[in-house]
Image (cartoon, rainbow, N blue to C red):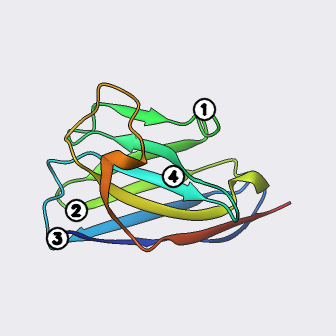
Amino acid sequence: QVQLVESGGGLVQAGGSLRLSCAASGGSFGTYAMGWFRQAPGKERDLVAVISWTADTTYYADSVKGRFTISRDNDKNTVYLQMNSLKPEDTAVYYCARGDSGTYYYTPTRSDFASWGQGTQVTVSS
């Protein structure tokens, strides 16, 4: 069973940047797609970005396109989320998750991800 541990969250002013990391251990990482989700208080957990196992395919939610970048380092079993030009509406708990496939030929959903981290809080002040 893979364990996922997120880090890098915190408090930042609007317009600022943060880089989230998610380190995997205890299971397969390099052959699975990885995703970042976020959940704001009282809201559903939404997909933010997904990266295929070879990193040649990425997907971004419309709300973060052009501002966030997902990447991975399979040698380090780590996936990253670079977040730039942060807005107050980006405030949420951010979770990383391992997909059940190496890549997706459709927009994946939460049900495509079975292993989850504990989350890291991102707060953007206005």
Q: Residues within 10 Å of mark 4 (few under 14, many from 20)?
A: some
Mark 4 or mark 3: which is in front?
3
Answer left or right for 97 relative to 19. Answer: left
Q: Please, what is the three-letter code of the amino acid marked with disc 3?
A: Gln
Q: Is residue 11 left or right of residue 21?
A: right
- Calculate the distance from the C-alpha at mark 2 to the C-alpha at mark 4: 17 Å
Disc 4 to disc 3, C-alpha distance: 26 Å
Is mark 1 in CB contact (under 8 Å) with mark 4? no
> How far across and down, in percent of the image, does residue 3 sit?
26, 73
Task: Please name the residue shown 41% across and 31% down the image.
Answer: 107
Q: Amino acid at mark 4?
A: Gln
| Front of the two marks 1 and 4 | 1
Which residue lies under the disc numbered 4?
A: 82
Q: Which residue is painted at 46% across and 62% down in the image?
A: 95
Which residue, given by chain and number where applicable, does mark 2 sit on?
77
* Residue at image mark 1: 62
Q: CA distance from mark 2 to mark 1?
A: 27 Å
Q: Measure the C-alpha gap from mark 1 to mark 3.
A: 32 Å
Give left or right: position of 109 versus 25: right
Tell me which numbered mark, 2 or 3, is placed earlier along the sequence.
3
Position of the C terminus by quadrant: bottom right
- Circle 2 SS class: loop
Name the residue carrying label 3: 1
Q: What number is the disc on residue 51?
A: none
Q: Pinpoint residue 10: horizontal percent, then vertical percent.
A: 63, 73
Q: Earlier in the sequence, mark 2 or mark 4?
A: 2
Q: Amino acid at mark 2?
A: Asn
Which residue is most to the right? 126
Residue found farthest to the top: 105
Q: Is residue 31 above or below residue 6?
A: above
Please say if the residues under marks 1 and 3 sit with CB atoms less than 8 Å apart. no
Which of the two discs, 2 and 3, sits closer to the camera? 3
